[in-house]
Amino acid sequence: RVGSASSSLNSLASLHGKVWFSAFETATGFEPYASDGTPAGTLRFADINPGTGSSSATDFARVGNQVIFAASSIAAGNEVWVSDGTTLGTTSIDVNAGAGSSSPGPFLPVGNLTYFAATTPGTGRELWVTDGTPAGTQLVADVRSGAQSSSPVQFVALANGTILFVANDVVAGLELFRSDGTPAGTAMIGQIVAGGGSGSIQDLVAVGNLAYFTADDTVTGRELWKTDGFTLTQVMDIYPGAPNGVLAGTLRAK
């Protein structure tokens, strides 16, 4: 944006040798850009919401050799978009057909596929997967069957390709799930709090074929836990008894 006015760029992501982001111009609003680090190589590659309206592209991630992100248009609402960085190579995947929004994201790339949460009237908010094409975009599993949402969050992938996420199936409450990308291979791993109470799982991070997280089982307080995708194990009751030994929001994986 020329002069002292700010382009207010946001949602930066490094993908396929370029930086992808959303930025503002008076004539186009907030739209998606890609940059190779030079002025000549920094370009808005699509005006998804034509004119001064904004598509507000966010959550740039990899899907195969392309980039996937969420953006809004008048015709389709907030939906999945895929791009190779060119205008002609930028297309939408209308998960919630019509003007209704599926509000996709966050996106988790695993191999040539990308997993994400999305909302449709028939299934509510559930786990989806895409190969970057409309035909290759499908619901993985309706964890909370029918129109109600399991609202999956905190997606991570183990080194063996297993997807882990936190979801609410009503019976068990908010607990940890695994998926291999199929309905039959999507299941709750176990219950931190037996009987339907929420284990308040946070800070889920993957390290090889294990994932670590903090949880509160109501007996030992918030402590460090781990999973291999099949069992849940408390690593240690760092602060013995009910007080918390770990602060939520402190786990990081490198």
Image: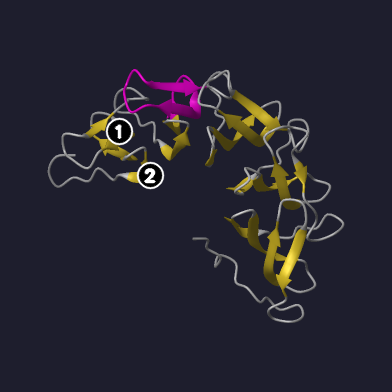
Q: Is residue 135 above or below residue 199?
A: above
Residue for point 68% across, 71% down? 223
**Front residue (pair 73, 238):** 238
Residue 74 part of the magenta segment: yes
Residue neighbourhood size for the residue with mark 2, other residues' Cα within 10 Å, grouped as few (<14), some (14–19), many (≥20): some
Residue for point 66% across, 77% down? 245
Q: Are marks 2 and 1 in contact (CB under 8 Å)?
A: no
Q: Position of residue 173 (x, y in %)?
A: 78, 51
Q: Which mark is residue 13?
A: 2
Say which element carries label 2: strand
Amino acid carrying label 2: it is Ala
Residue for point 32% across, 21% down? 87
In this view, which residue lies farthest toward the right?
195
Residue neighbourhood size for the residue with mark 1, other residues' Cα within 10 Å, grouped as few (<14), some (14–19), many (≥20): many
Region rendered in magenta: 72-93
Residue for point 74% across, 82% down? 240
Amino acid carrying label 1: it is Gly
Of callouts 2 and 1, the N-terminal one:
2
Image quadrant holding the N terminus, namely top left
Q: Which residue is mark 1?
A: 29
Q: In 3D space, how far apart are the residues under numbered discs 2 and 1 (Cα atoms)?
A: 20 Å
Residue 140 part of the magenta segment: no
